[in-house]
Image (cartoon, rainbow, N blue to C red):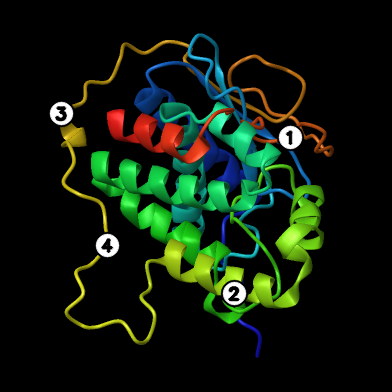
Amino acid sequence: MARKNTGLTKDEFVSEAQRLVTDLAFYAGRPVKIKLVGGDHIAFTYNTEDTKHVIEVVLNPNCVKDVRTKERATLILRGIGYHELLHHLHPAEEQYKQANEEGFMPLFNLIDDEQNERRGASQFPEWGAHFQSVCAFIFPTARRRASKISTGIADGGADENEEANNSGFGAHAVYRERWSEFAYHLRRHIPHHHASASDPPSGPGPGTDSSQLQRPPQRESFAVDQGSASAPGHWARHTSTSQKGRQARPTTSFWSQWSKRRCDQ
């Protein structure tokens, strides 16, 4: 007998998204808007270097439709929101541009996502369980040896994934299979079977206590947009995915420049 799906209903999804956007605005310290856009993507954001305007996160309204329990669906939904916000808290648009030009965008995307989530969990420990749920959802054990390059919450949807899987090293099945297993172990924080039990765990270091943060005065600092209307709280559906995700991103010695920037932060 098939298991009954007791995940989030449409109304519950809307309610959770409204709570999420309020919290994202609090953590960001400025207005945030979530747009519901159907398509092949899970979620994406853009203009991460812009610190003066509303932060916009594009979210697929069907992103957790196959999750069978409300609790897990909520953890994943919030984890996706925190993940996208971290691209604004730790922007790397120039680095993404150079990675794209030099042909290793998927690898940089994978490492940047991992680093951002570790930073987020270090600063806000309560985010950790959400990121674990997202990674378990996106990198399931059953597909750890899939012949496919996937960075997880990929920007741009199917077109971008297709390019990564049909060009350069991605055109070779052996490379794609090794990529899948590497991504699985990296993002799920699961050691390889030959790892020693004495190996120290890799996880976020001690962070600040988020309970010390003070909420800003209530104002129109957030909005969830389900359509062309931009007024706070208004929803409408989109069906296109014309907007790409994070903008492509340096020139000059990329790795040394990126490492220096990360270490200085």
Q: CA distance from mark 3 to mark 2?
A: 43 Å
Instruction: Check disc 3 and give the amino acid type.
Output: Gln
**Quadrant that contains the C terminus:** top left
Q: Nearer the viewer, mark 2 or mark 4?
A: 2
Instruction: Check disc 4 and give the amino acid type.
Output: Ser
Residue 180 in the image, given as x and y percentages of width and height:
59, 70
According to the picture, the residue beneath numbered tag 2 turns out to be 178
Q: CA distance from mark 4 to mark 3?
A: 26 Å
> Going by the picture, which residue comes out furthest to the bottom?
1
Q: CA distance from mark 1 to mark 3?
A: 36 Å
Q: Residue 244 has which mark?
A: 1
- Asked if residue 265 shows in the view, the reply is no
Q: Given contact means CB atoms under 8 Å apart, are the residues at marks 3 and 2 in contact?
A: no
Instruction: Check disc 2 and give the amino acid type.
Output: Arg
Find numbered disc 4 in the image and state the secondary structure of the residue it sits on.
loop
Instruction: Check disc 1 and give the amino acid type.
Output: Lys
Q: CA distance from mark 2 to mark 1?
A: 27 Å
Residue 156 in the image, given as x and y percentages of width and height:
73, 42
Specify whether 239 is left or right of 29.
right
Q: At x 82% / y 49%, what residue is drawn?
A: 159
Q: At x 31% / y 11%, what residue is drawn?
A: 217
Q: CA distance from mark 2 to mark 4?
A: 21 Å
Q: At x 68% / y 78%, what residue is drawn?
A: 174
Find numbered disc 2 in the image and state the secondary structure of the residue it sits on.
helix
Disc 1 or 3, which lies upstream in sequence?
A: 3
Q: Residue 212 has which mark?
A: 3
According to the picture, the residue beneath numbered tag 4 turns out to be 202
